[in-house]
Amino acid sequence: MNRYLMTPGPVPVSTEVSRSQAKPLIGHRGGEFSSMFLSIEDKLARLLKSGGRTVLFPASGTGALEALAANFTGPDVKVLSVSCGVFGDRFREITALYGADIVNVDAALGEGVTPEMVAEAVERNPDCGVLFLTQNETSTGVLNPIDRIIAAIPKEKRPLILVDGVSSVGAMPCFPEEWGIDGLATASQKGLLTPPGLGLVWLSERGWKTVKERKCQSYYFDLERQRKVLDKDAPENPYTPPVSLYYALDEALDEILIDGWFDLRRRAARSLAAGIESLGFSLLVKDKNFRSPGVTAFSLPSGDIPAVSKALKAFGVEPAGGQADLKGKIIRMSHYHDVRWPEISLALGSLYAALGSNRAGCGDFMKEAFEAWEGE
Ligand code: PMP
């Protein structure tokens, strides 16, 4: 049976990306490896509209977040930690391990973080040297307006701004230099359409200056140590890199760097959401402006979500469930990869069938979804 993977990471990767990993391995201390690294860096610079070095760790997204925590926080740092779900909370847990003093700001599950909330918190906590934000909260499908949040903080009062872009980069605009982000962490297996295993970290000039001045609390994740070898004429990785994943990322970036890619992701999200609502499900993110272009979460009022999930699995459709407080209460369907109308109709048709006897009263879900697909 064909399986249709709809988890918000890993996401399906193209045949070209899969095949690229089968290329013969090359040594990582040589010109060929450096050229590949520079090609990836150049493509990432175009995607992020930001120059400068990007560090690639053999790690998942949590590793990239830990790299930020190890280099920017510690017992001497007070962190303003803004969270609207599981992943905002995770960064908080990591920084707590590194001994940072943490001030929490929380939005309710399914709600987004507003510029006003953050600007006020920064104003109230001028001693916080680091502000932590999540761009796309995968556990609820919330997209936070990072550009507007940062713009709401007066420049002279801005702490170092670290952003979890693990489930945003690649699928939606994320322009750290333009927006004023100092440290951005992401990973290969979601918007970057690559298999899991690479954690990526981008820093601003202010970010690099800070890591140079601070003593990193980790050997492996020491960004300054990485920077030194990346700055050689032929950039290297200090430790053995997962070369096959580099091949895959290099290939996948070409698939993302096409005109209209972000619009396509938004269009797929909008269409899927319209169909899901029309089927009688309830979208977790009520405010359209906060809905993620990468992942959509929904519940079934007075219905049995675990039964729907089980039926979907039996059809070969594999979304994700809820996490923490939302466990057993929601389904999350991702649309990071090249999801267009055929894939949307597959997902909606499967949901329709999975509803079983609850189907009574379903709206004209395909009509709603198609109108949203065709609309602006
Ligand atoms: N942050 C966000 C926003 C995520 O979505 C995830 C993974 N779902 C992580 C961090 C952790 O990434 P990983 O599972 O790759 O360690």
Image (cartoon, rainbow, N blue to C red):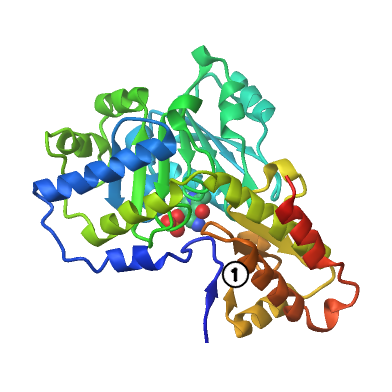
360 left or right of 202 in image: right
| Residue 363 in view in this figure | yes
Whether residue 267 is situated above or below residue 319 in the rendered picture: above
Q: Mark 1 vs ligand 1: CB under 8 Å?
A: no
Within 10 Å of disc 1 (Cα), the crowding (few <14, some 14-19, many 20+) is some
Whether residue 102 is situated above or below residue 368 in the rendered picture: above
| x then y, percent, for residue 96 | 45, 43
Instruction: Name which quarter of the figure residue 7 lies in.
Output: bottom right
Q: What quarter of the picture does the C terminus occupy?
A: top right
| x then y, percent, for residue 37 | 23, 45
220 left or right of 197 in image: left
30 left or right of 64 in image: left
Residue found at the far right of this picture? 361
Q: Amino acid at mark 1?
A: Pro
Instruction: Judge by depth and name the residue closer to the eye, 291 or 348.
Output: 348
Residue under pointer 1: 319
Q: Residue at x 19, y 37 (%)?
A: 230
Q: Residue at x 38, y 50 (%)?
A: 253
Instruction: Judge by depth and name the residue closer to the eye, 269 or 358.
Output: 269
| Residue 59 in view in this figure | no
Whether residue 165 is situated above or below residue 211 in the rendered picture: below
Instruction: Name which quarter of the figure residue 104 lies in.
Output: top right
Q: Secondary structure at mark 1?
A: loop
| x then y, percent, for residue 366 | 78, 67
The image shows a total of numbered marks equal to 1
Q: Residue at x 69, y 65 (%)?
A: 330
Q: Residue at x 61, y 19 (%)?
A: 123
| x then y, percent, for residue 272 | 70, 60
